[in-house]
Amino acid sequence: MEASGLAPEEVVLRLLDVIEKDIVPITTEAVKKGNKVFGAAILKLSDLSLVVAGTNTEIECPLWHGEVACIKNFWNLPEEGRPLPSECLMLATHEPCSMCVSAITWSAFKEIHFLFSMEDSRDAFNIPHDLRIYQEVFKCERATRENKFWKAYDLPKVVETLPENGALGEKVTMLRETYASLSELYQDSKGGASSTRIPLS
């Protein structure tokens, strides 16, 4: 984790707070319309201030995954005052799929943090497409989590390595419960008018 001047515990707490306070609210509204539960945010590495957040809006376009929508919002910011990608990190609620990780790579973000793995997306959220696309299209299990372009951090696993992690573990559990409720709402919407606008629902 490259955020300067902050202890790992402070970094993780800030990222979990952004998920709770900045991503969950917009994702909740999007899920009510029939979109998936995936969201993202871009933060400055220097102080972890929020630059922009985004959420899945696949009913508008199947390419608008949470990370891609967030990146679109980022590049739509006025150039004056917009930080460089190298000065930022990408926070994703779910480990980025092949399309999103390509968008992150092409945008030159160097650091990715996520709350749920692709296995979680498959098993807990009943959305198996991420792993299936890697396996069927790219003939590999997944993207590496560290390469010459970026490094990815699994936040719950980071929490497990931290001393005195009880409060952080409780926050992870709370967010898991929040997303379980959002997932139930999304799954219940399948078969409705909005879901017919998502090719891979």
Image: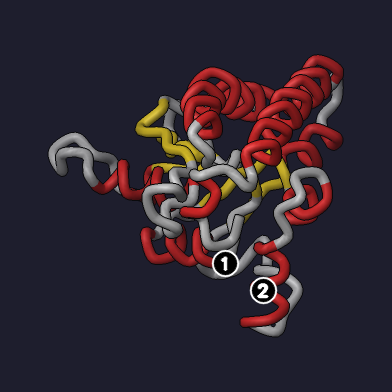
Measuring from the top left, give residue 7's x and y in whole percent: 65, 26
**Mark seen at residue 36:** none
Relative depth, front residue between 160 and 67 = 67
Say which quarter of the image contains residue 88.
top left
Instruction: Find disc 1 in the rendering and name its residue.
Output: 98
Q: Amino acid at mark 2?
A: Tyr
Picture residue at 67% right of the left edge, 74% below the top: 134
Which quadrant, please, contains the N terminus? top right
Residue 198 versus residue 39: which sits nearer the camera?
A: 198
Q: Secondary structure at mark 1?
A: helix
Image location of residue 196, percent across then percent down: 52, 53
Which residue appears at 53% of the width and 62% of the height?
199
How many residues crowd mark 1 within 10 Å: few (<14), some (14–19), many (20+)? Answer: some
Horizontal placement of 40 versus 118: left or right? left
Which residue, given by chain and number where applicable, does mark 2 sit on? 134
> In the rendering, at what x and y percent does residue 125 appear?
75, 45
Q: How many C-alpha atoms fall within 10 Å of the one at disc 2: few (<14), some, or many (≥20)?
A: some
- Identify the mark nearer the N-term, 1 or 2: 1
Give the residue drawn at x 62%, y 47%: 191
Do labels 1 and 2 touch, CB within 8 Å? yes
Side of 32 relative to 103 (left or right): right
Give the distance between the C-alpha atoms of the residues marked 1 and 2, in whole angstroms: 7 Å
Position of the C terminus, as image quadrant, is bottom right
Q: Name the quadrant containing residue 6.
A: top right
Residue under the image location 67 percent in, 63 percent down: 129
| Direction from residue 110 to residue 72 in the image, left or right | left
Indicate the position of residue 114 as horizontal and vertical percent values: 64, 43
- Of all residues, the one furthest to the top in this rendering is 167
Q: Nearer the viewer, residue 187 or 166?
A: 187
Residue 8 visible in rendering: no
Q: Is residue 199 visible?
A: yes
